[in-house]
Image (cartoon, rainbow, N blue to C red):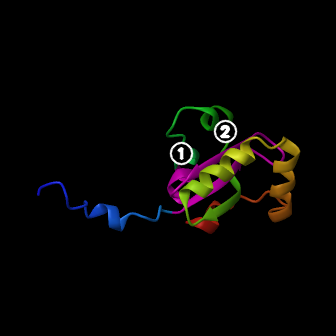
Amino acid sequence: MAGLVPAIHVFHHNAMAGGFVYILTNRPNGVLYVGVTSDIARRVAEHRAGDIDGFTKRYGVHRLVYFEQYDDIRTALQREHNIKHWPRAWKVRKIVADNPDWRDLFETIV
C-alpha cells in the first residue's frame, strides 16, 4: 500500500507565508523602484549594501519610502504587479499620502 498515504507536508503548508510590497527611491521625487519580498528588513538591507547588481545598485536606489504588508505572499505579488503598472504620478501620490517628507523608513522596520 505504499504511496497511498498523503505526504504529511500537504497538511502543514496550506497557508502561504506573508509578504511585503515596497517602494525605494534615491531621493525625494527621484527614481522609483517597486519590489516584493517575504523579509523586508533583509531585502532592503541588501539594496542598501549594493549586494546585488542591477537597477537599484546602478541608480543608488536605497531609501525605503513606502511599504505594505500582506498575510499571503501571493497577494503581495499581485499588488506589486499592479503598482508597477501604475503611472508614476499615482506612485508618488501614494508615497506622499503616507510619507510626505519622503523619510527613509528603514529604521522603522529593523
Res 94 → quadrant: bottom right
Residue at (25, 61) in percent of width and height: 6
Q: What residue did someone put label 1 on?
A: 49
Q: What element carries label 2?
A: loop
Q: Which of 25 and 69 is in front in this view?
A: 69
Q: Is mark 1 on a helix, strand or loop?
A: helix
Q: Which amino acid does label 1 sit on?
A: Ala
| The stretch drawn in magenta includes residue 46 | no
Residue at (68, 59) in percent of width and height: 67
Q: Is residue 19 above or below residue 30?
A: below
Label 1: how many Cα within 10 Å (few below 14, some 14–19, many 20+): few
x and y, in percent, of residue 73 in the image: 54, 57
Magenta segment, which residues? 18-45
Q: What residue did someone put label 2 on?
A: 60
Q: What residue type is labelled 2?
A: Gly
Label 2: how many Cα within 10 Å (few below 14, some 14–19, many 20+): some
Res 72 → quadrant: bottom right
Residue at (58, 32) in percent of width and height: 54
Instruction: Tell me, yes or no, if residue 108 can be seen here.
Output: yes
- The N terminus lies in quadrant: bottom left
Report the side of 99 relative to 42 (left or right): right
